[in-house]
Amino acid sequence: MPFSLYAAIVPSYQQILGAVAGLLDRAEAFCTAKSLAPTEIIQARLASDMLPLAFQVKSTVVHSIGSIEAVRRGVFSPDMNPPPESFTALKARVADALTALAAIQPAEVDGFLGRDMRFSFGERNIDFTAENFLLSFSQPNFYFHATTAYDILRWKGIAIGKRDFMGRLRVKS
């Protein structure tokens, strides 16, 4: 069986988004155990010129199901809406993305091959094929934001490790 675009994209999004959901659960439990206001974690940043945890989590959704929806439209523009401001809303956003990803048929994603795709932000436009957009733009962004979310939580003292980041592995059955 040949390797497909679907296989290269969607299961990885599901795996890491599942892990992000678990990270949010751990972060919320940490806040409860330490009597911290959730905003202490949700608005935490690694550096002053980086965006907070809430944005990082939102961006994992934007660069997973949002990238698939963008290919369907033929254009991707950054989501400039503010991120959710509570653990409940962040977890709901991730859960909705996982539900939407589960509904995608492999044939649809494999049918994206060769399709024209454009990144558009203000006056800037970058043309891609769908597969190059997904594999060279959205997927690296997805992993960057998932990693940054993980790093923020580690930096804030939450006891998480590599297994928490990797999520449920897709092992041979």
Image: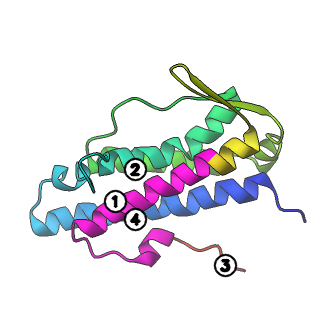
Q: Amino acid at mark 2?
A: Val
User: What percent of the width, then of the height, locates residue 124?
Assistant: 56, 24
Q: Which residue is mark 1?
A: 24
Query: Is disc 1 placed on a helix, strand or loop?
Result: helix
Task: Specify which label sits upstream in the sequence, 3 or 2.
Answer: 2
Q: Quadrant of the N terminus?
A: bottom right
Q: Label 1, label 2: how many angstroms apart (C-alpha)?
A: 9 Å
The disc at residue 22 is 4
Q: Is residue 84 above or below residue 43?
A: above
Q: Residue furthest left?
A: 35
Q: Label 4, label 3: how many angstroms apart (C-alpha)?
A: 19 Å
Q: Amino acid at mark 4?
A: Gly
User: What percent of the width, then of the height, locates residue 6?
Assistant: 74, 53
Q: State left or right for residue 4 relative to residue 42.
A: right
Task: Specify which label sits upstream in the sequence, 4 or 2.
Answer: 4
Q: Amino acid at mark 3?
A: Val
Asked if the residues shown at circle 1 and circle 4 are in contact, with their CB atoms under 8 angstroms apart, the answer is yes
Q: Which residue is mark 3?
A: 171
Q: Which residue is mark 2?
A: 57
Q: State left or right for residue 19 relative to residue 140.
A: left
Q: Residue furthest right?
A: 1
At x 40%, y 50%, the residue is 57
Q: Amino acid at mark 1?
A: Leu
| Magenta range | 137-166
Q: Label 1, label 4: how many angstroms apart (C-alpha)?
A: 5 Å
Image-quadrant location for residue 37? bottom left
